[in-house]
Image (tube, rainbow, N blue to C red):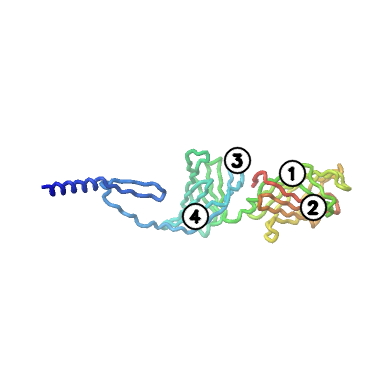
Amino acid sequence: MKKIFTLIILAMAVVTAAQAQTITINKTDGTKVTYDASEVSSIDFAPKSDTTTIHSFTGYLLVSSAYFQNMYYGDAAQMSVLAVGDKYLCRFDDATWGHGLFNITLDKGTISGTGSVTMVNPQGGASSTHDATMSGTMTHITISIPDLMGGTTISWNYGDPRAYKTAGTYSAKDNIVVGGVADYSYSTNDSVDYTVVAVNDSTINLVVPEESFDNLAMMGNLVMGTYTISNIAWNAAENAYVRSYGSDGITFDCTIAGKKGQYEFTNSDCKVVVRPNADGTLTVDNTYYPGRMPMSIVSTFTGTRKNAAH
């Protein structure tokens, strides 16, 4: 009798344990889902997805809206083209401008399609989703979002954004040497601002500010007006942007000893070298001939970035 009673107790314990058994599914995002065993009749695994990644590239972004133009937003945006069965998708991912998914058509290297972009609120609020269109090539893709900031265009580019990283305004005093004579060295009366504007990946424009120098030997006070040197291309051999601009037709105002006139740079030796430095500063070496001076002025400016300007 005692043995029978013991068997009954064991059987009841097994039934209770089975009824209390749970199934826990550990998800890849770190969360868990738990079910009672009694709730699960079967577990079926879906067949493997037929999604294939065709291309995946990282590039840089230039963004324009009603409030700003061609602002550089880093070089870590990813664009992926996926094949899902006989259809194609393009996925966009960027830490600042969010995530997008587009149904696209591929035609001889061009991309076009429609979809949406979801952006995280930088203030910590809810994310927002916007209808968008996509067009371009495998190396330059434009995403248009009509209802964001009066119309926003995100330009994704596969390449080296060297010029966009350099673009900005730099401040310091400028230093010049007249006629190559060290004794004739002078500095601007005040700090001045040089501005670099990106034209494309590897070309810049340089806005040279008005500069004033006092008590130059044989000249008295000198005021050089502002001017712009355009299309200064990257020179890998010199590791800098370089241009000879004596034939570019650049005009400038120049005041020497109180006498003001407008002149043009025509000397073939007029040359500018713009060098971004590893510490974030910018060095500009500029050789020019103000007015009708027969001797050169060589300026050396090394400035600290004030702000980015693209």
Around disc 3, counting alpha carbons within 10 Å, would you say few (fewer than 14), some (14 to 19), or many (20 or more)? few
- Looking at numbered disc 1 in the image, what kind of residue is underneath it? Val
**Left/right of residue 146 with respect to residue 307 in the rendered view:** left
Residue in the foreground of this view, choosing between 175 and 138: 175
Callout in the foreground (4, 3): 4
Provide residue 52's location: percent of width, then percent of height. Answer: 44, 58
The residue where tag 1 is placed is 192
Give me the C-alpha separation between circle 2 and circle 1. 16 Å
The kind of residue tagged 2 is Val
Which residue is painted at 56% across and 56% down in the image?
Answer: 139
- Residue at position x 59%, y 45% in the image: 64
Numbered mark located on residue 298 in the image: 2
Question: What distance separates the C-alpha of mark 1 from that of mark 4?
Answer: 44 Å
Evaluate if marks 4 and 3 touch, with contact meaning CB atoms under 8 Å apart. no
Select label 3 or label 1 by which is in front.
Answer: 1
Q: Which residue is mark 3?
A: 67
Residue tagged 4: 80
- Whether 32 is drawn above or below 56: the answer is above
For mark 4, does the 10 Å Cα neighbourhood hold few (<14), some (14 to 19), or many (20 or more) residues?
Answer: some
